[in-house]
Amino acid sequence: MTLSFIRSRASTRSAAAARRRPPWRPARAAVLATALLALVLGAALPAAAAPSPGPTPGTARAVVPPGVTAGIAVYDRKAGTFTEQVNPSLPFRSASVVKLLIALDVLGDRGPDALGAQDRARVDAMLRTSDDNAASHFWTVNGGGTIIDRMVRKLGLTDTARPPATHPGYWGYTALSARDTVTIYRYLLDTAPAAVRDYVMGGLRSSARCAGDGYDQHFGIPGAFERPWAVKQGWSGFSSGGCTTPAAATPAAVAPAAATPTAGTGGPAAAGVDLARPALHSTGTVGPDDGTIVAVLTLHPDGTSYGKAYTDLGRLTRSLNVPGATRPAGMWIGTWGADVVVREEATTKSRKLTVLPAGAEILVSCQKRGQEVSIPPYTNDWWAYLPQYGGYVTNIYLSVPENQVPGLRLC
């Protein structure tokens, strides 16, 4: 493995050491050792999570984690009804979800074939990897806030407004609500020309795990449900998102999404928007034929890490009543440490696939023995398979009291 092991918490002592002690001692010692490591590393160990059953069909049961402000709208297209609504008209700063409106403005009523090669590449990057440079380009050349004005009129949005007058170039500060997000997807699926619909939705179905700025963007909907799904995600106010090392971004590209916000006014919807707390949003469609539209917009307490917000949004999304959704099998388990590497096989010599957001909760489907990994005095040869990443992590990184995860099947 890499030197990132040094920054991680070892879950247990070696199996041999455990066998030399009475049955009650290993678990107790592991807890004490974990607490000691937490003090040394200056971090808190996230609790392991039990599998989360889905809600009973026909019931609404959104569970909003403590400290989180949420705007939620889940729309069943077949029934023509909402199955979940929590603060549906509350405006949030959109972060990268606004790229849907930027893309629709670029396309108009034309298909992608009407775009030049460079513009088509930019729209592709906005939809698949949430590219900020592309959004900033279109924001500049197509009139900035007038893009939002045009989309409000065309789609009949009620809670959407251009960024505050004090931050006209900050496209990520566009005001947007959960119910307006549903309206955007309903326009795409039911009203937009077929060429526009197929192109945009195709891009959202091809959402890459690692965004262009190095954030893991498969939180919320992609984590909670099996494909088919299509997503446009948003994040703002976090310092690190794990995944890959992002390419250097120019100050102009970063400024609209990442500069320190201040209050401002930009219309009735924008007036009450919180520009300070970390924001994490998951929006898109779930199930066959894009049967259900899901919009989950969230704000988190100041100082919340990306991994914590990632986990809280995941738990919230999994609690929702989403008709037609298929939930993945496995256990949701907390992780420990930064730069936790996901490998193609259960060995440190196999190909590195990606890294996990620090402290994020992950879905584990099975486990097997592989290469023995040691961080003296801790040793473990068990590895867990992460189906949504297509690879393995050593169990040392999992927040469980044993080397082998109790109750988890063998691979």
Image: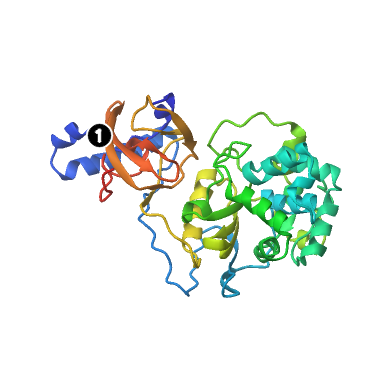
Q: Is residue 48 left or right of residue 66?
A: left
Q: Quadrant of the C terminus?
A: top left
Image coordinates for residue 399, horizontal then vertical, percent: 35, 44
* Residue 280 in sight in this render: no
Q: Height in image: 24 above or below 91?
A: above
Q: Nearer the viewer, residue 94 or 401?
A: 94
The residue positioned 74% from the left and 65% from the top of the image is: 159
Image coordinates for residue 178, horizontal then vertical, percent: 65, 63
Q: Is residue 129 left or right of residue 342?
A: right
Per the image, label 1 sits on a secondary structure element best described as: loop
| Res 369 quadrant in image | top left
Q: What is the three-letter code of the residue carrying label 1? A: Arg
Q: Is residue 146 left or right of residue 74?
A: right
The residue positioned 76% from the left and 37% from the top of the image is: 117
Q: Height in image: 189 above or below 402?
A: below
Q: Quadrant of the N terminus?
A: top left
Q: Height in image: 393 above or below 330?
A: above
Q: Height in image: 33 above or below 68?
A: above
| Res 375 quadrant in image | top left
> Is the residue marked by circle 1 packed among few (<14), some (14-19), or many (20+) residues within 10 Å?
many
Report the number of numbered marks: 1
| Res 5 quadrant in image | top left
Image coordinates for residue 361, horizontal then vertical, percent: 43, 47
Give the residue pinned by disc 1: 13
The residue positioned 80% from the left and 63% from the top of the image is: 154
Q: Nearer the viewer, residue 159 or 387?
A: 387
* Residue 338 in sight in this render: yes
Q: Nearer the viewer, residue 19 or 294?
A: 294
Q: Nearer the viewer, residue 160 or 184?
A: 184
Image coordinates for residue 267, horizontal then vertical, percent: 82, 61
The residue positioned 74% from the left and 36% from the top of the image is: 253
Here the colouring is rainbow
